[in-house]
Image (spheres, rainbow, N blue to C red):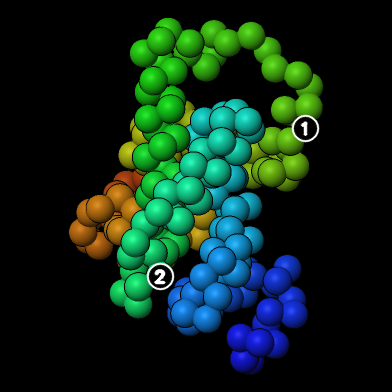
Amino acid sequence: MSATLKLLAPEAASRWTEDELKALHAENPRLAMDMVVRKFRDRLFVHASYITKDAQEAHDVVQEVFIRAMREQRFFEPAFQQKAWLFRVTSNLCFNLVRDRRRRGAILEASPPREQTQADQVDRVFEGQQRAEVLAAIDQMSEDHREILLLRYYDDLSYAEIAEVLQVALGTVMSRLSRARRRLAEVLPAAAAS
């Protein structure tokens, strides 16, 4: 399918490959960045929401990620891994935000209850009782285990992309993921049975 035909359906940005986005950038840089935003914004928002536990903060983080992407000179270069870079920057910004929040003494559990709409938003993002139970179990795990399980199963990153996001070797990704799965099976008895 040619870039010209695809331009007629920008809502289908999720089907565009990184190579197609890079080719489009040569013709129309502004449209290429718009398509990157359309392709990744929802997945990055879900990822940021899970880490920050706050929809507004997640929204702000995702906006900052795309601002940084626009400023990143290498973003549309042929060898640049856009998806891995976007998830790595999102994770780093979220963890910095959570760390800063803790430093200020505003621990998540101690914060005043939010409006009811926040719970509804989270429920829409993570539909289904089983998914909610798994996420609750993941919350009980270490930060390393939580992050690798989310990147693999909720953000659907490949092992190579996870290695790029975490800046570790591929073998490290596989061993961490294996340990995280075993830990999840301990924390969530239903996970061991399935």
Whether residue 191 sits left or right of residue 175 in the image: it is right
**Category of crowding for the residue at label 1, using alpha-carbon neighbours closer than 10 angstroms: few (below 14), some (14–19), many (at least 20):** few
> Where 63 sits versus 96, above or below?
below
Badge 2 marks a residue whose secondary structure is loop
Percent x, y for residue 17? 52, 76
Quarter holding the N terminus is bottom right
Three-letter amino acid code at disc 2?
Phe
Is residue 187 visible in the rendered structure shown here? Answer: no
For the residues labelled 2 and 1, the Cα–Cα distance comes to: 37 Å
Q: Secondary structure at mark 1?
A: helix
- Relative placement, left or right, of 111 versus 85 is right
Mark 2 touches mark 1? (CB < 8 Å): no
Depicted 163 relative to depicted 185: above or below: below
Q: Quadrant of residue 45?
A: top right
Residue 18 drawn at (x, y percent): 47, 74
The residue that appears at 39% across and 32% down in the rendered structure is 95
Q: Position of residue 33 (x, y in %)?
A: 54, 64
* Residue 106 visible at all: yes
Q: Earlier in the sequence, mark 2 or mark 1?
A: 2
The residue positioned 23% from the left and 54% from the top of the image is: 168
Q: Nearer the viewer, residue 157 or 189?
A: 157
Nearer to me, 32 or 183: 32
52, 178: nearer the viewer: 52
> Where's residue 117, x and y in %?
78, 27
Mark 1, residue position: 120
Question: Nearer the observer, disc 2 or disc 1?
Answer: 2
Which class describes the residues within 10 Å of circle 2: few (<14), some (14-19), or many (20+)?
Answer: many
Vertical arrangement, residue 182 with respect to residue 157, above or below: above
What amino acid is labelled 1 in the image? Asp
Residue topped by disc 2? 76
Residue drawn at 40 percent across, 15 percent down? 102
